[in-house]
Image (cartoon, rainbow, N blue to C red):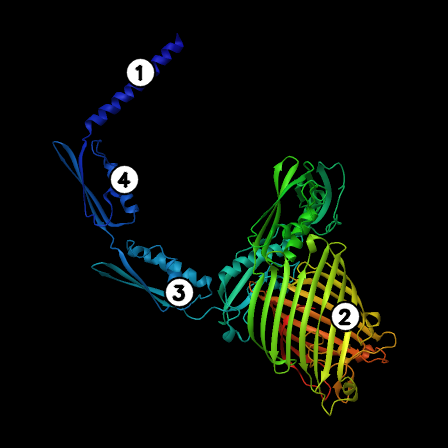
Amino acid sequence: MVLRQRTVALFSLVFLQVLLFLGEAAGAPLVAGIRIEGLERVDRTSVERALEIREGEPFEESLVTRSIRNLYALGTFSRVAISALEDDSGVILTVRLREFPPVRKIEFQGNEVLSDQELEEKLVMKTFSFFDEGKTGSEVKALLSAYRASGYHETRIRTEFREEEEGVILTYHIEEGPKALVAEIDITGNKALEDRTVLKAMQLREKGPLAFLSGSGGYDEAAVKDDLARIQYLYMENGYLDVAVEEPEVRSHPDGTGVYVAIDVREGRQYFLGKATFSGDWEGPPEFARALPEVVEGDVFVRSKVIEDIRMFENSYRDQGYAWARIDPQFRMDPATGMVDLNMALERGPLVQVRWINIAGNYKTRDYVIRREMRLMEGELFNQKKLEDSRKYINSLGFFESVSVSVEKVGEGQGDINVKVQEGRAGSLSAGMAYSSVSGLVGTLQLSLGNFFGRGQRLNLSLEAGSETSEYSLSFTEPRLFSSAYSFGFDLFDRETEYSTYTQSSIGGGLRLGYRLSDVTSLSARFRRVDYEVYDVSENASRYVKDQEGESTTSSVRFGFGYDTRDFPMDPREGLNFNLSTEVAGGMLGGTNDFIRLILEGSAYKPIVGDLIGSAHLEVGTINSFGGGDFSISERFFMGGLYTLRGFEYREVGPLEDGEPVGGTKSFLVNLEAAYPLIRDAKVKGVLFLDTGNVWADGEDVDFGDLRYGAGFGFRWVAPIGVLRLEWGFNLDPLPEEEQPGWEFSIGTLF
């Protein structure tokens, strides 16, 4: 009964409130009409939407105030007024508006550092928008901010506008002033890392003595923001996980020489790796591991290395067929002890078999050329290492701009391997002129087909004709004969070279056969037949050269063993390349030249810092007569020039007779290089080098005290036709009669 009484009372109260509201509404006049005046460019609908008052609804003063506020917020009116006139029909509202004039044109005067387009992108008031004088202040601030970001802190900007019949012409008068140079960078709050260590990690640099000429040392706001992240990363890589880098303080230097930049660092404490535990599908320590972890308990906690260790454990399981293996790293930091405990929760997933290998993007290269480089096969158990090797060997073909190899889940225990390539220029035709100390002025024509008819075969045709040399050569290589482990190739050439006291011609060719023992080791055999002729011997030639006049023939077989782990043979970043060969000429093979030649050759490549690549090349050779026979000057070792000992004239290093090079029977050469990309997309590099070596005559002992030294610099372009080299070498200890060779140019291959 009580509940019913309360319900009736509540209903009665609500009903009374409704009656009172209706009574008030009935007493208010209604809006009978709305007139809008002053519109020229603004659409009437936009105004009606901004009004809070509607025809047929009760008139309220508060709605007028809100409507005026909404109309000003549109940003298109300089004046808004609403008046009300009541008659028998109700209230008639009149909305009187005055539009801002349009911006007919925006002009910039005095700007050189930033273009008109760059400046206009910073503005809110664009051409054909409404002009609001009150907003010009914020527009100037936006322009000044753009100049400060470019290092021009003394820029001054004033505005001028004139209103014409068609609109306003707005002009920004700009005085850019000089670029602000960084007089001093002050790192504060740092104790663990020295100033120079922090400054080295930054892009921003203090101005140098020649900054007024080079423009170096300029203040760049974008670079400073990036530097804050760089400093934070540097500290975190040294175990300071709580580091905080404050926003820089930038002001004019007290001595008026430029900008003073202060960056405050709050280092926090250094952390170390605590206990490493394993959970999830791990029952204990890792069952498989590609390598030992880089960070162990007690080491400084370097986050990037810890993450690399986690990825290493993941890949170790993927090598065993668990393609979806994932490790969830769980860190627990203890600020009191400075230790970070790590738990690696493994979700191993099922064993995965390869279902299909899908190849895409190869509109020129045939599928089987790519497929035969795959180290994973359909139906096999997945292996992450083989997946990575597949990409490496496909990329090593040199036919593609990019190669990606990934696994796609198609079932709980199945995955597809997707190979996507982007075809590159595998062929080229070039012609030009070149000069070198070896050949003089030479005209060249090069035809290179690195992916002949899309079959992966290589065909090279080279024609050179100059004042001192001419050469015609043709070579063909089938790297995978019938898609097997065998390779096959042949070479044909006709070469004539004019030396200081004689001319030598050589016509011949060879057959090559190779066999892959594994991905990194191979055997090779080559049969070579060359007919030499030495003629036009000068009267002042040495006795040895005069004895060589006439014809001779080399018929030889060479056997070799190769070991190659380079990531990209044409332009390697890392890896080893080792070759050991023995060549036997004469005897039952025929010919007039009888000898045994042994050559050991090796190169190593390794990144030094970032994209700076270091390389070392060693070559040792000996040649001895075979069966009591003899061999011509054409088969001896010579040194000097672009492909051996740089900084010396071609063939000028080694035994001399009457001041003329006659070659030797023992050779030793070392080349050290550091290369850095100058134009990355064009594959142009700068090179610094140091060479040492010598050649010794038959019966002469090898004495490393006789080594000659050369050093220099150059440029290298990895082009489709080969490696173009332009290098300048210096003889570090020249003899009185020796000259510096200067610039040398060639098209060929690396060591």
- Calculate the distance from the C-alpha at mark 1 to the C-alpha at mark 2: 109 Å
Write down the residue under mark 1: 12
Image quadrant of residue 521?
A: bottom right
Classed neighbour count for the residue bearing mark 2: other residues with Cα under 10 Å, few (<14), some (14–19), many (≥20): many
Amino acid type of the residue tagged 3 in the rendering: Ser
Depth check, mark 4 against mark 1: the one in front is 4
- Calculate the distance from the C-alpha at mark 4 to the C-alpha at mark 1: 38 Å
Question: Percent x, y for residue 275?
Answer: 73, 43
Write down the residue under mark 2: 619
Classed neighbour count for the residue bearing mark 1: other residues with Cα under 10 Å, few (<14), some (14–19), many (≥20): few
Residue depicted at 19% across the width and 27% down the height: 27
Question: Percent x, y for residue 479?
Answer: 68, 58
Q: Are marks 4 and 3 in contact (CB under 8 Å)?
A: no
Mark closest to the chain's N terminus, 4 or 3: 4
Helix, strand or loop for disc 4: helix
Helix, strand or loop for disc 3: loop
Write down the residue under mark 3: 115
- Calculate the distance from the C-alpha at mark 2 to the C-alpha at mark 3: 56 Å
| Image: 191 above or below 296 | below
Residue depicted at 31% across the width and 18% down the height: 13
Amino acid type of the residue tagged 4 in the rendering: Arg
Write down the residue under mark 4: 49
Could you say which is closer to the camera, residue 478 or residue 135?
A: 478
Question: Percent x, y for residue 453?
Answer: 59, 58
Q: Which quadrant of the figure contains the N terminus?
A: top left
Could you say which is closer to the camera, residue 471 or residue 97?
A: 471
Mark closest to the chain's N terminus, 4 or 1: 1
Mark closest to the chain's N terminus, 3 or 1: 1
Depth check, mark 4 against mark 3: the one in front is 3
Residue depicted at 34% across the width and 58% down the height: 137
Could you say which is closer to the camera, residue 625 or residue 82?
A: 625
